[in-house]
Image (tube, helix red, strand yellow):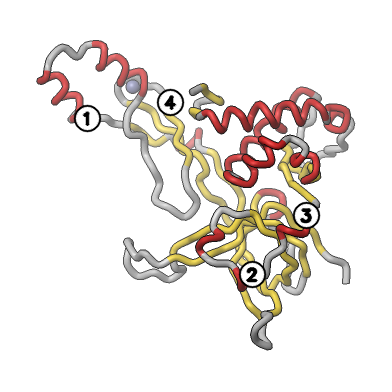
Amino acid sequence: MSNLGDIELHGAQQDMLHDWRNLFESMSDQIETFEAGEAPTIAFEVDYEKIASVSRLQSSLTNWPGDCIELGGIVLSEQFRVYNHNSRPILRITNFPANFNHELESLRMRDRSKIITAQVKVKKTREYMGWLKTATYTCSRCQEKVIIKQRLGRNRESPLRCRPCFNEILKHMKNETDIAEFFHFPWSFDFDQELCTYQDIQYLEVEQKSQSKNAQFSMTSLVREEMVGLFHGGDVLNVAGIVRIDHMPKRNFEKDTRRILYLDIIQASKVDL
Ligand SMILES: [Zn+2]
């Protein structure tokens, strides 16, 4: 395991970082001459074919699309800093092949975490909002900062322990009484609002003509970052997105096990009609 900032990475994630670094280094001319302008965040497009030319990266994108795109974004930001671009790039993968295309109404739970593409019409846009992407806590024993990645629309997660304190306690353990105490160690953390990171998001209702009925099939979708506020009711979009599961929108008890599918849009372009 190694660290990226304060977030621990596992083997498959390290492979992704390595593959993205190689890929972006091979695109250094394009990154160096990229016209980022003054926009604080800007889309940087990478053709799917480029990713498919690195077979391990293609398989990472298929198996763990969320992690793979996020780590690609981190490596891309590093490259942007190398060339002194002030904007923060958002990695957008374009030109997915035709076999990614799906009818929205054909999607089921088995499709969760898959990347699909579709042509959809925006039925309704929701208000912009933000969410807490990473929360930072301070250990009240040693003041170490602990960063916890959060999940969209789930309960906020706190650290289970602080690693430096954990290691120190382990070092001083001598007998069974110590072990028992260790399991009941009163970990205590303060939430550090200022050091948290947030992400802009917007929900869109999108629709597509139903193949089985003479009606529109609609689905909730989500756009993030620079795509927030870009689209309007009536727009026709070619989208690529990750199929994700969420709670029922109006669940009336906390542990309701029913789930719905929604589309976490990773790339979208308007179709001129
Ligand atoms: Zn500590």
Ranked by sequence position, the earlier of labels 2 and 4 is 2
Q: Which kind of residue does numbered mark 2 sit on?
A: Leu
Q: Residues within 10 Å of mark 3 (few under 14, many from 20)?
A: few
In the rendered image, which residue does mark 3 sit on? 97
Image quarter of residue 76:
top right
Residue at position x 26%, y 16% in the image: 170
The Cα atoms of the two marked residues, 2 and 1, are separated by 48 Å
- Distance in Å between CA atoms under marks 2 and 4: 43 Å
Query: Going from the N terminus, do you reach mark 2 or mark 1 first?
Result: 2
- Residue underneath mark 1: 186
Tag shown at residue 104: 2
Mark 1: few/some/many CA within 10 Å (<14, 14-19, 20+): few
Q: Amino acid at mark 3?
A: Pro
Cα–Cα gap, marks 3 and 4: 43 Å
Q: Is mark 3 within 8 Å of ligand 1?
A: no
Q: Confirm or deny contact between disc 2 and disc 4 (CB under 8 A).
A: no
Residue sitting nearer the eye, 162 or 60: 60
Between the C-alphas of marks 3 and 2, the distance is: 17 Å
Taking the image in four quarters, ligand 1 sits in the one at top left
> For the point 61% across and 29% down, which residue is it?
15
Q: Residues under labels 4 and 1: Cα distance? A: 17 Å
Q: Residues within 10 Å of mark 2 (few under 14, many from 20)?
A: many
Q: Which residue is label 4 attached to?
A: 145
Of badges 3 and 2, nearer the viewer stands 3
Q: Amino acid at mark 1?
A: Pro
